[in-house]
Image (cartoon, grey):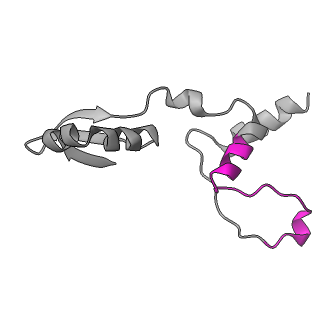
Amino acid sequence: MKSVGIKTLKARLSEYLRLVRAGEVVLVTDRNEVVAELRPTNRQSVVPPTLDDRLQLLAEQGQATLRTEEIRHWSGLMKKVELEDFSSQALLDLIREDSR
């Protein structure tokens, strides 16, 4: 989260809007007091609707690697993936829905 004074925001508005578009939250201050918050709109609609689409998006962002070979032969790095408002129970529920 970044903060910016009104005068600087006015002078560099395009730069801060690019940050917001990329998902950053920007606090606008006036004399060191927060007076506004700029954040992306419709954050929920950015999440792909299906599990396959979510996994593909994570792979495109470099947060996951889609497996193309059996796990026992895979030597890639193991990294924890955290999704906001997404639990292992939700993942299992999605898998169960897809198999019906």
Q: Is residue 73 above or below residue 16?
A: below
Q: Is residue 63 left or right of residue 6?
A: right
Residue at 88%, 58% (x, y): give it. 68
Q: Quadrant of the C terminus?
A: top right
Q: Is residue 32 one of those drawn in magenta? A: no
Q: Is residue 1 left or right of residue 81?
A: left
Q: Residue furthest left?
A: 31
The x, y position of residue 10, in whole percent, is 19, 37
Residue at 62%, 51% (x, y): give it. 61
Q: How many marks?
A: 0
Q: Is residue 42 left or right of residue 98?
A: left
Residue at 74%, 58% (x, y): give it. 65
Q: Nearer the viewer, residue 85 or 56?
A: 56
Q: Quadrant of residue 72?
A: bottom right
The x, y position of residue 73, in whole percent, is 90, 71
Q: Is residue 11 above or below residue 64?
A: above
Residue at 66%, 64% (x, y): give it. 79
The x, y position of residue 94, in whole percent, is 77, 34
Q: What residue span does the magenta drawing correspond to?
A: 54-75
Q: Nearer the viewer, residue 29 or 81?
A: 29
Q: Is residue 97 above or below residue 8?
A: above
Q: Is residue 58 left or right of residue 16?
A: right
Q: Nearer the viewer, residue 67 or 81?
A: 67
Q: Is residue 65 above or below residue 51?
A: below
The x, y position of residue 83, in whole percent, is 59, 45
Q: Is residue 64 one of those drawn in magenta? A: yes
Q: Quadrant of residue 29?
A: top left
